[in-house]
Image (cartoon, grey):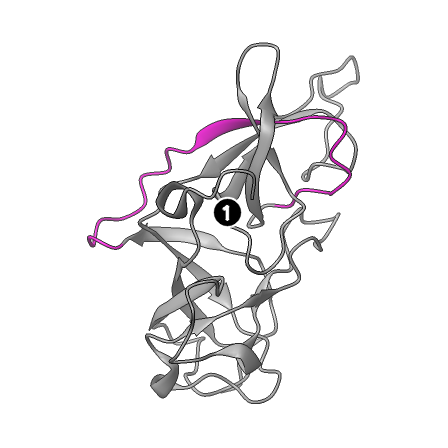
Amino acid sequence: MANVDTPRGLKPVGNIAGAPWNGKPTLYYVPASDSTAFYLGALVKPGGTASAEGVPSVSGNVATGNPVLGVVVGIDPVMGAGASGRDSTTYRAASTERYVYVCDDPNALYEVQEDGEGGALAATNIYMAADLTGFTSGSTTTGLSSIEIDSSTATASGDGTEDVLIVGFARRPDNELGSQWGKFIVRLNNHFFIDGSAGA
């Protein structure tokens, strides 16, 4: 059975020690000066500043090779006077001040789809490093990121700057190994809390 093309960014599913993800993210600040839209499942990196209350900032302007803080798992709603009591979107629109929740555990594991470009990933790609694609794109309807594994970049001889380490396959009936758009389990390979590259 062929896999369905449903990119949803990175979804926390557990950690490297075998425990399930407990759903406890960290609050971060996004200033209006950040011109990148934020989607659920997208990566963020340190923003180099903080809110007036001292909440550290993050930037969504992420590219391959950047040490990252983690993955956006929630976006604080903007409360308003409308009938619903909120004037929010399911994503953070570019150049708007918002607060976001980030899974910033360097040991977290995530499920993410591969793009199948240059051939679908297979069992032999487990424990290889790879880059991601679609960093700043997503759906303004669902609020989900379009990040995927760039399957053509999977390598067994990485230099540590690749975005993810492929550590497993999401085993379930609707996910066929070796078929395009497979869903894999990955760990962030270039995490700021481990790398500590100031000013990245």
Q: In the image, is residue 152 above or below residue 82?
A: below
**Disc 1: which residue:** 68
Location of residue 8 by image quarter = bottom right
Q: Is residue 35 magenta?
A: yes
| Quarter of the image with the C terminus in it | top right
Q: Nearer the viewer, residue 154 or 103?
A: 154
- Residue beneath the point at 44% across and 55% down: 190
- The picture places residue 137, in percent across and down from the top left corner, at 71, 55
Segment colored magenta: 16-39
Assign a secondary structure to mark 1: loop
- Residue beneath the point at 55% across and 52% down: 66
Q: Is residue 166 magenta?
A: no
- The picture places residue 13, in percent across and down from the top left corner, at 36, 53
Q: In the image, is residue 76 above or below residue 1?
A: above
Q: Amino acid at mark 1?
A: Val
Location of residue 132 by image quarter = bottom right
- The picture places residue 117, in percent across and down from the top left corner, at 62, 83
- The picture places residue 176, in percent across and down from the top left corner, at 43, 82
Question: Is residue 75 rendered to the left or right of residue 91?
Answer: left
Q: Nearer the viewer, residue 180 or 105?
A: 105
Question: Is residue 96 rendered to the left or right of residue 112?
Answer: right
